Amino acid sequence: MVLPGHPESDDTQTVNQELVLLAGFDAGQTTCRCRLSRWNGERFQVLGEGRGSGVSHLDAHDGEARFRRAIDSSLEAALEQVRDESREQPLGREHLHAAAIGASGIEADTDLQTRGAALLASALALPEHRCLATGDERTALRGAFPDRAGIVLISGTGMIVVGRDATGREHRCGGWGWRLDGAGSAFDIGHQALQLSVRMADGRVPDGPLRHNLWEALDCRSAAELKALVVRDRHAVADEARLAPLVADAAANGDPAARRILQCSASALAKAATATAHALGLQAPCLEARGGALEHMPLFLQLVQTSLREQLPDSHWQTTDGDACHGALVLALDRAGLRPH
């Protein structure tokens, strides 16, 4: 499999580009993927991919140790696949030339980014200048738009919008954590629905089947039980995000309250994309949708697209195969200091 890339560094190195081995990591909280590729001067040649353990925030308990385990376990799985399928001399981590990782919680131009790059370099025994750690939204952006301007809208459990212009300047909007800024995410949809359910329960708004379906999913029988549930330590953001499909189904079946919730969240996501376009001076931006809420809830995506037609009438959508691992490889190629011939 080959995918195009476009490094932007002006550095050149006297290395045989066909032998350059790059690693791109996509590190989530559940699992980390590592993709190994050769760069032949024009394209990536994917050699293998492996999965390992997930990461947590670097400042969390055991955060740095989990980060290293994710790198080690996914890289070893990828190398094992290469060894199984190759008749050539076996590759090892000593053959790596550069690497990049996109991980949840790493903000650009922060101490966390510096720490993440140092951990990646240490784990791979590479010079720090050949390693990059960044947020997974940035690798998603470079996967979708490796060499041109565009905006990625990501809506899963959380949300974030990030874009870049033709010069490589980037801007992010939203995604500042569920306590501050969840509008446009599956959590936001589920949370709005639970707020509506208690208003239904105490008579402020008419009751409906949506409340019953939500409470059944959470095994609650009263507003008092729901109140007790949501303050428990084991109740997580993901628990409310998992309610979003129930809201989308209700909206698709004609429930006006559920549709209003979807519309509110869709408008918020579209507004973040519009703000990103304006910040980057993109008059007719190319857009790409990522994340489970947009990929698995067609009505929500439709409402986002409708809102964007109103806010960014000259925008247009694309769908590519360039995922976050591909974006990480593009960033690793930047760090390698190589240009296509």
Image (cartoon, rainbow, N blue to C red):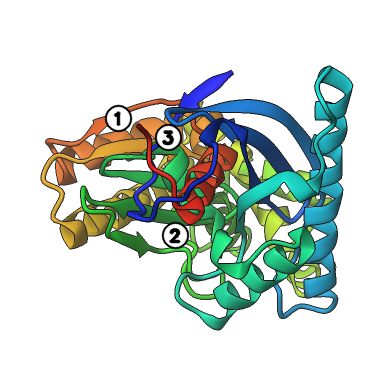
Q: Nearer the viewer, mark 3 or mark 2?
A: 3
Point out residue 272 in the picture as x, y percentages from the top left corner.
31, 57
Residue 134 in which image quadrant: bottom right
- In this rendering, position of residue 305 left or right of residue 143: left
What kind of residue is marked 3? Gly
Quadrant holding the C terminus: top left
Asked if residue 41 can be seen in this view, the reply is yes
Quadrant where the N terminus is found in the figure: top right
Contact (Cβ within 8 Å) of mark 3 with mark 2: no
Per the image, label 1 sits on a secondary structure element best described as strand
Residue at (86, 49) in percent of width and height? 73
User: Which residue type does callout 2 highlight?
Assistant: Ala
Distance from label 3 to label 2 (Cα)? 33 Å
Disc 2 or 1, which lies upstream in sequence? 2
Nearer the observer, disc 2 or disc 1? 1
Indicate the position of residue 24 as horizontal and vertical percent values.
62, 45
Q: Residue furthest front?
A: 14
Quick one: SS at disc 3?
A: loop
| Marker count (numbered) | 3
Q: Secondary structure at mark 2?
A: loop
The residue singled out by tag 1 in the image is 317
Which disc, if any, is residue 41?
none
* Dot 1 crowding, Cα within 10 Å, few <14, some 14–19, many 20+: few
Q: Tell me the tag on residue 183.
A: 2
Identify which residue is drawn at 51% across, 70% down: 107
**Left or right side of 15 for 278:** left
Earlier-in-chain disc, 3 versus 1: 3
Q: Please give the residue where the numbered disc 3 appears in the rendered image.
A: 5
User: How would you rate the neighbour count of disc 2 (Cα within 10 Å): few for under 14, some for 14-19, many for 20 or more?
Assistant: many
Front disc: 3 or 1? 3
Which of these two is toward me, 338 or 249?
338
Q: Quarter-wise, where is residue 106 in the image?
A: bottom right
